[in-house]
Amino acid sequence: MNRYEVEFSPRALSSLREATHYILQDSGTGRASDWLTRIMRSTDTLKTHPRAFRIVGAYEGEDVHARVVMRHVLYYLVDDDVRVVTVIDVVHAAHGTARDRFEPPGVRERESGKRQMVSV
C-alpha cells in the first residue's frame, strides 16, 4: 500500500504546543504526554487512508478534511500528487471561532442535528 507522509503546518505546530502547555498546566505532565501521544498516533490513519474523514470546507482552494480526536479536531489537506497530508491546524472542538476558519456556517449545525436525530 502506498503511504502518505504527514506534515504539520507552522499553525498546527503552534496549536499543538499551546494545547499541550494548557493541559500540562491544568492536568500535569502525564496527561499532557498522553494527549500528545494520542494526537500523534491518530495521524497513522492519515498515512494509509487520508480521505477516510469528512470534508468540512475549503482552505486556499483545497478540500479541508476533519479528523476528530478526543475533544480536538485535526484539519488537514491531502495532496495526492506528492502523497502528503498536511495538518493545517488542531482546534479544540469547543472553540467555534477557530473552527469557522475551516468549516463554513451551517456545517456544525447540520452535524449536531444529525446526532440529535440519532440519539432520540
Image: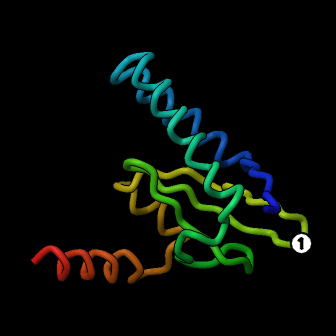
| Relative to 81, 40 lies left or right | left
Q: In which quarter of the image is the N terminus?
A: bottom right
Mark 1: which amino acid?
Answer: Asp
* Quarter of the image where one finds residue 102: bottom right
Identify the image's colour scheme: rainbow, by chain, secondary structure or one colour.
Answer: rainbow
Q: What SS does tag 1 mark? A: loop
Mark 1 burial class by Cα count in 10 Å: few <14, some 14-19, many 20+: few
Relative to residue 52, is residue 33 depicted above or below?
above
Expressed as whole percent of the image width and height from the top left, the position of residue 59 reads 67, 73
Relative to residue 7, is residue 101 depicted above or below?
below
Q: Residue at x 39, y 56 (%)?
A: 93
* Quarter of the image where one finds residue 17: top right
8 or 101: nearer the viewer = 8
| Relative to 64, 36 lies left or right | left
User: Which residue, as the protein is rendered here, is positioned at the far top?
Assistant: 29
Q: Which residue is drawn at 24% across and 81% down?
A: 113
Relative to residue 48, is residue 11 depicted above or below?
above
Read off the residue under disc 1.
81
Q: Residue at x 37, y 49 (%)?
A: 71
50 or 77: nearer the viewer = 50
User: Which residue, as the protein is rendered here, is positioned at the far front?
Assistant: 1
User: Which residue, as the protein is rendered here, is positioned at the far right?
Assistant: 82
Q: Which residue is drawn at 43% across and 29% down?
A: 22
| Relative to 64, 39 lies left or right | left
Q: Quadrant of the C terminus?
A: bottom left
Say how many tags the image has.
Answer: 1
Expressed as whole percent of the image width and height from the top left, the position of residue 80 reads 82, 72
* Quarter of the image where one finds residue 106: bottom left
